[in-house]
Amino acid sequence: MRYDTPVYFQHSQGRIYNPETGNYSKPEPKEEMRFACVQDTGESRMQLIYGEIRQGSLTVQLQNHYDDVFETIRIGGRRYKVDAVRKTRFKHIFTVSEVQ
């Protein structure tokens, strides 16, 4: 397995108040990059998690645990939400699906 794909864990900070305009603005999400092994999710695993076969589902495997808070994962130009998490002794495995 190669851990060569950059994966960005995104965390938004909430809305920021601008006193000059009196409006709230949505800030850019903070991103933290890790290298991961990204693969298509197998059909049997999709059947267990979703109860059906879904396109756009990926399995992201990190060599170490990632314990920080995040909302979405960005891989390339696409955003994904986490559907299932599995922690082994040293690795952290996420099953993700694309956010529309």
Image (tube, helix red, strand yellow):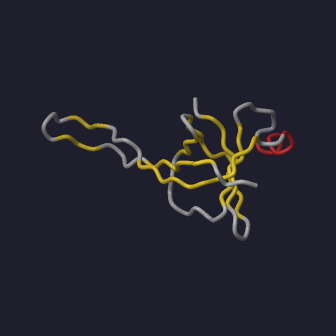
| 56 up-or-down from 73: above or below | above
| 36 up-or-down from 80: above or below | below
Is residue 2 found left or right of 32 in the rendered image?
right
Q: Quadrant of residue 45?
A: top right
Direction left: furthest residue: 20
Frontmost residue, 36 versus 100: 36
Residue found 23% across the figure and 43% down from its top: 17
**Residue 85: x percent and y percent?**
68, 54
Residue found 67% across the figure and 54% down from its top: 3
Q: Quadrant of the C terminus?
A: top right
Residue found 48% across the figure and 47% down from its top: 10
Is residue 30 found left or right of 57 in the rendered image?
left
Direction right: furthest residue: 44
Q: Quadrant of the N terminus?
A: bottom right
| 84 up-or-down from 47: above or below | below
Is residue 87 found left or right of 32 in the rendered image?
right
Frontmost residue, 1 versus 31: 1
Q: Quadrant of residue 99?
A: top right
**Residue 89: x percent and y percent?**
72, 70
- Number of numbered labels in the structure image: 0
**Residue 87: x percent and y percent?**
70, 63
Q: Quadrant of residue 90?
A: bottom right
Frontmost residue, 11 versus 50: 11
| 93 up-or-down from 38: above or below | below
Residue found 70% across the figure and 33% down from its top: 56
**Residue 98: x percent and y percent?**
62, 35
